[in-house]
Structures are given as structure tokens and as C-alpha cells.
């Protein structure tokens, strides 16, 4: 029985050492500088909603524009308008819609579709 346990422990240690050697030495992780513009549309929309939530807290319009510029869109204001309307059409979280409408209003791209959500402060 002892011989079995020693063999098992030795096998586990050899396997662990072999796996770590392959993982760190032979096949290390390769990372690439992926820009935010390469994100899928869903994740760009979520990023925009997070920036809008930050804007609701600090009210920094120029900061929000700078943070959204990393998405590489041609017109950030139009992007915010489109994301806001997509969120409204898809009936996404109300807090996100309120924050996006607040940002769209500050950027001057408020549309008729956004009017019912205007002036509402998310909790």
C-alpha cells in the first residue's frame, strides 16, 4: 500500500513538473495589443454604458468623450445616440438607459425616442 501511495505521489509530481514546464517554457501565453475597436458590438455597447454610468457620477463630458474615443468610432456622439437607441429598443436595464440618455443629452444628441427617459436620475 505504501509503495502504491509513493508511486502515485511521484507520478503526480512528475506530471505537475511536466505540465508547468510545457505551460511556462515551451508553450507560453502570447498576448497581443488588442485595441478596443476590435471588440464585438455587444461589448462596445457595454463599455459605452459603463462610461455613461461614470458620467452620471462625475458629469465630466470631455472625460467621457476621451474614454469613448478609444473605441475608434468616427463620430462618438453618433455612437452614443445609436447605443442609447439600441438599449431602448432592446428594453435593456433601465439604469443603463437613464445613464445613456443623460450622456446623450449632455452631448446634444437627444432624440424623440429618448425623451421619456430624460431627467430621470438612476438610483
Image: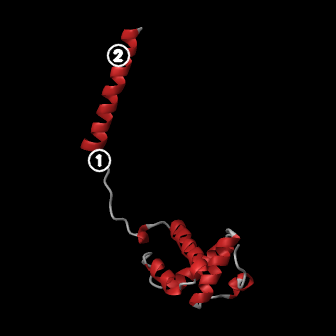
Farthest residue, direction bottom: 108
The disc, 2 or 1, on the residue closer to the chain's N-terminal end is: 2
Rendered position, 48 above or below 7: below
Considering only vertical position in the picture, is 107 above or below 5? below
Image quarter in which the C terminus is found? bottom right
Q: At numbered mark 2, what does the secondary structure look like: helix, strand or loop?
A: helix
Does residue 9 appear to the left or right of 112 in the view shown? left
Question: Does residue 59 appear anywhere in the picture?
Answer: yes
In the displayed structure image, the side of residue 35 where residue 106 appears, left or right: right
Q: Residues within 10 Å of mark 1 (few under 14, many from 20)?
A: few
Q: Where is mark 2, residue-wise?
A: 7
Pinpoint residue 61: horizontal percent, then vertical percent: 53, 86
Pick the residue in front: 31 or 37. 31
| Location of residue 46 (image quadrant) | bottom right
Residue shown at 28%/39% (left/top)?
22
- The residue that appears at 42% across and 72% down in the rendered structure is 37
Q: Which residue is mark 1?
A: 28
Q: Nearer the viewer, residue 99 or 113?
A: 99
The x and y percentages for residue 19 are 32, 35
Tell me where residue 62 appears, x and y as whole percent.
Answer: 49, 86
Q: Is residue 44 above or below residue 10?
A: below
Query: Where in the figure is residue 63, as x and y percent of width and height?
Result: 48, 82
Amino acid at each position: 500500500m505504501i509503495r502504491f501511495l509513493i508511486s502515485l505521489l511521484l507520478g503526480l509530481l512528475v506530471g505537475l513538473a511536466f505540465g508547468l514546464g510545457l505551460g511556462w517554457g515551451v508553450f507560453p501565453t502570447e498576448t497581443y495589443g488588442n485595441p478596443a475597436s476590435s471588440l464585438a458590438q455587444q461589448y462596445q455597447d457595454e463599455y459605452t454604458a459603463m462610461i455613461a454610468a461614470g458620467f452620471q457620477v462625475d458629469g465630466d463630458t470631455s472625460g467621457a468623450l476621451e474614454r469613448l474615443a478609444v473605441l475608434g468610432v468616427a463620430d462618438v456622439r453618433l455612437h452614443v445616440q445609436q447605443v442609447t437607441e439600441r438599449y431602448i429598443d432592446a428594453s435593456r436595464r433601465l439604469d443603463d438607459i437613464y445613464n445613456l440618455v443623460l450622456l446623450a443629452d449632455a452631448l446634444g444628441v437627444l432624440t424623440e425616442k429618448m425623451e421619456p427617459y430624460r431627467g430621470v436620475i438612476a438610483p
